[in-house]
Image: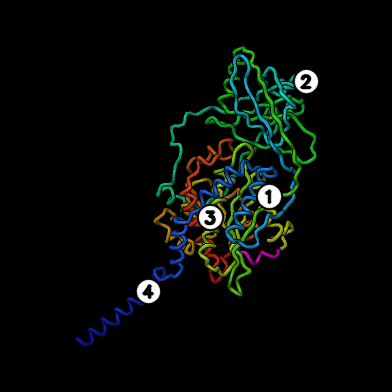
Amino acid sequence: MKINILLLGLLLTTFSLFAQKNVPSVFDPDLKIANQIKTDAINNSKVDDYLYLLCDKGGPKLTGSRGILRTDTIAMLEMKKMGLENVRIEKVRTWDRGGWELNKAYMAMTAPYYIPFYPAPVAWTNGTNGLSSGKVYYFSATTKEELAKLNGFYTGKIVLMPDVLQYQINYKPLATIFTDEQLKEMEYQPISTRQKRAGLPTENILLTYQDILQFLRAENAAVIIHETGDFNVPVISFFPYKRGDDYSPCEINITCEHHGLMQRLIENGEEVRMDVEIEVEFRNDENIYIVVGEIKGTDPKLKDELVIIGAHLDGYPMSNGAGDDVTNSVGVLEAMRILKSLDIKPKRTIRMILWNGEEVGLHGSKGYVEKYVKDAEGNKLSEFDKISAYYNADYGPGKFRGISTQSNIALEPLFKAWAQPWHHIGFTTVIHRYFTSTDHIPFDEAGIPAFQFIQDPLEWGRGSHRIMDFADRLVPDNIRHNAIIFAWFAFKTANLEEKLMRKD
Ligand SMILES: [Zn+2]
């Protein structure tokens, strides 16, 4: 009997040791910080204030415009106010476009009847030099032979480019969030080699859209009108202008509804006339800026190492860039406010950066990497060995539902453990996809662990890069959620014994 009790005691002790060893998170003191982050995000939120400031007060934020400089300054002041250190607007690169400002845009069909249109002038094209009134010509040539006969015909005229979009009745919901099944599917990634693309036929007698556009630009048409938007909102696009270029006709994007109306009228023999007045300004500002601030590290050995969180503040003309990417810039600001107010004293320095120049070629992040991480020749610079990780968000106003390791499978156990406390708010998933096209890429390409969060799509694709990306379409509670995750990942990365494992 005695022996059995002893045995039982031994078994129980072993079991409890075993249990403790395998559920360390229960005793993880960092979870106290998790609670504090969540409580602060709910009770002391500044998300609504930051949203107003960066979105409505800041205005449209095309890189090099007055709006982005105004918003950079607003963000910098808020960062100083919350007590961040080394707060500054810093020039990281020069660029060859310079800024462009839209000062006036008016457009209407005046015959056969009056309808005002919502124009989206193509950025970095010229204005109309006062009011331009005249007949609208629909460009209908389809072959190079036909084009050759049109030399001189379109000079000084208002030209409607060919039809490229068909309005599609949309039976899908306006906004979506990821289901558990969809998130599960994202975790799976089969091995596959890339398919080679079939080459285009080299000799083609049919005109491409670019052929027509180049022809009309060279002919000096007065106004070139593009069809570039469905769902009643034109898409905004950029002309590849370089500072000092001598250019060009005024180009304007309109919706497929307005384009279709004029096309049908012209094809049925009506004379369509328009009034167009576009006033623009080439600013030729050669500098690309970023807005930087930090919470200093406190560990004697690790304090000079860095964890960076960021999003891009720049956007498009004509709307305020709410979903792309003010929403995530606010998430970054709020995360820093929370960490600062909790006075967490991180081992490594936590730095935030709001990028300019993302929409016009990732200029801010590329400039930063070339200045501090790895230069254009591939030489390692001062921060190459210091940055543990860069966390970016640029997928709209949806909640963070998970994170991608950016094909670094070594990080899966760590990220899964960090996600665990947030399953209850919907942050559950770790995947390995290589996300592209935004500011984490220059870091990734320089060899720094750099990540993008998975976000619910919501209305993604209907707001960004269009003229109606305003704060009304944002969900402040999602930003509060995202700030919690930003703060937590920054805090956990800052306090690890080691830097995050790199891919090579
Ligand atoms: Zn973006």
Q: Give the residue type that dot 1 points to.
A: His
Q: Amino acid at mark 3?
A: Glu
Residue position for label 4: 20
Q: Secondary structure at mark 1?
A: helix
Label 3: how many Cα within 10 Å (few below 14, some 14–19, many 20+):
many
Q: Please give the residue where the numbered disc 2 appears in the rendered image.
A: 152
Among numbered discs 2 and 3, the one appearing first in the sequence? 2
* Residue behind mark 1: 363
- Horizontal and vertical percent position of residue 116: 60, 23
Identity, as a three-letter code, of the amino acid under mark 4:
Gln
Q: Residue furthest bottom?
A: 2
Q: Residue at x 67, y 51 (%)?
A: 364
Secondary structure at badge 4 equals helix
Q: CA distance from mark 1 to mark 3?
A: 24 Å
**Disc 1 and disc 3 in contact, CB within 8 angstroms:** no
Q: Position of residue 26 (x, y in %)?
A: 39, 69
Residue at image location 19% in from the left, 86% down from the top? 1
Do callouts 2 and 3 mark residues in contact (Cβ within 8 Å)? no
Q: Please, which residue is most extreme toward the top here?
A: 269
- In the image, residue 123 sits, relative to residue 20, either above or below, namely above
Question: Mark 3 or mark 4, which is nearer to you?
Answer: 3
**Marks 3 and 4: CB-CB under 8 Å?**
no
Structural distance between the alpha carbons of marks 4 and 2: 83 Å
Tell me the quarter of the picture where residue 42 sits: bottom left
Q: Which residues are magenta?
A: 380-388
The residue closer to the viewer here, 319 or 417, is 319
State whether residue 134 is above or below residue 355.
above
Determine if the C-beta at disc 3 is less than 8 A from ligand 1. no
Q: Residues within 10 Å of mark 1 (few under 14, many from 20)?
A: many
Relative image position of residue 414 (x, y in whole percent) = 49, 64
Q: Earlier in the sequence, mark 1 or mark 2?
A: 2
Name the residue carrying label 3.
334
